[in-house]
């Protein structure tokens, strides 16, 4: 990936100073990056940003708190925003290995 493309993608990631960027994967044209934002309950939400070779940028997040704001940062509008929903709430018992949030332990390091 050339320096100009790296700088272009970095500019998008830098729109989210509250996110601790963790991993990226892809090719010279297509790339994804994901990171974490801490929550008040000691857990963390993810933000996944997708870049296409044509220059389009998309995102997915588990953050109910930040989702609408992040959509506005990327696209400058609320139009087209849809909130993420829990797999357990949409599919119920149809997905046997869905995470049930109430069963997860708190991240003790984050809440200390």
Image (cartoon, rainbow, N blue to C red):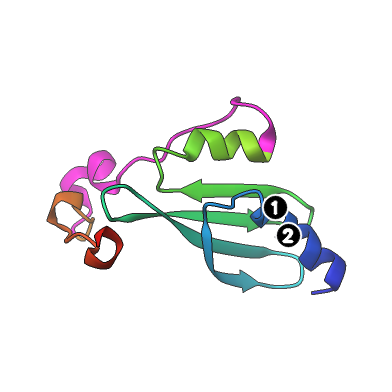
89 to the left or right of 72: left
- Which of the labelled discs sits on residue 12, or is there none? 1
Image quadrant where one finds the N terminus:
bottom right
The magenta stretch spans residue 79 = yes
- Relative horizontal placement of residue 36, taking residue 8 as reference (left or right): left
Q: Is residue 54 above or below residue 70?
A: below
Count neighbours of disc 1 (C-alpha within 10 A) and say few if under 14, some if 14 to 19, many if 20 or more: some
Provide the residue designation for mark 2: 9
Describe the element under mark 2 as helix, strand or loop.
Answer: helix
Residue 58, how many percent across, how many down? 62, 48
Does residue 107 appear to the left or right of 4 in the view shown?
left
User: What number is the disc on residue 79?
Assistant: none
Find residue 10 and report its horizontal and vertical position in percent: 72, 61
The percent position of residue 75, horizontal first and vertical second, equals: 68, 35
Tags 2 and 1 touching, CB below 8 Å: yes
Residue 28 location, quadrant = bottom right
- Residue under the point 48% across and 39% down: 67
The quarter holding residue 96 reads bottom left
Question: Is residue 82 in the magenta section?
Answer: yes
Q: Where on the picture, by quarter, is residue 98?
A: bottom left
Which span of residues is magenta-colored? 75-96
Instruction: Give 75 or 66, whichever is nearer the viewer.
Output: 66
Residue beneath the point at 22% across and 65% down? 108
Mark 2 Cα-neighbour bin, 10 Å: few <14, some 14–19, many ≥20: some
CA separation, marks 2 and 1? 5 Å
């Amino acid at each position: 990936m050339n320096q100009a493309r790296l700088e272009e993608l970095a500019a998008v990631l830098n729109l989210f100073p509250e996110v601790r960027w963790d991993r990226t994967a892809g090719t010279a044209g297509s790339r994804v990056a994901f990171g974490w934002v801490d929550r008040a309950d000691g857990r963390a939400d993810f933000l996944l940003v997708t870049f296409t070779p044509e220059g389009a940028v998309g995102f997915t997040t588990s953050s109910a708190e930040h989702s609408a704001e992040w959509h506005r940062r990327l696209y400058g509008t609320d139009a087209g925003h849809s909130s993420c929903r829990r797999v357990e709430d949409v599919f119920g018992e149809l997905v046997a290995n869905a995470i049930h949030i109430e069963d997860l332990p708190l991240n003790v390091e984050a809440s200390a």
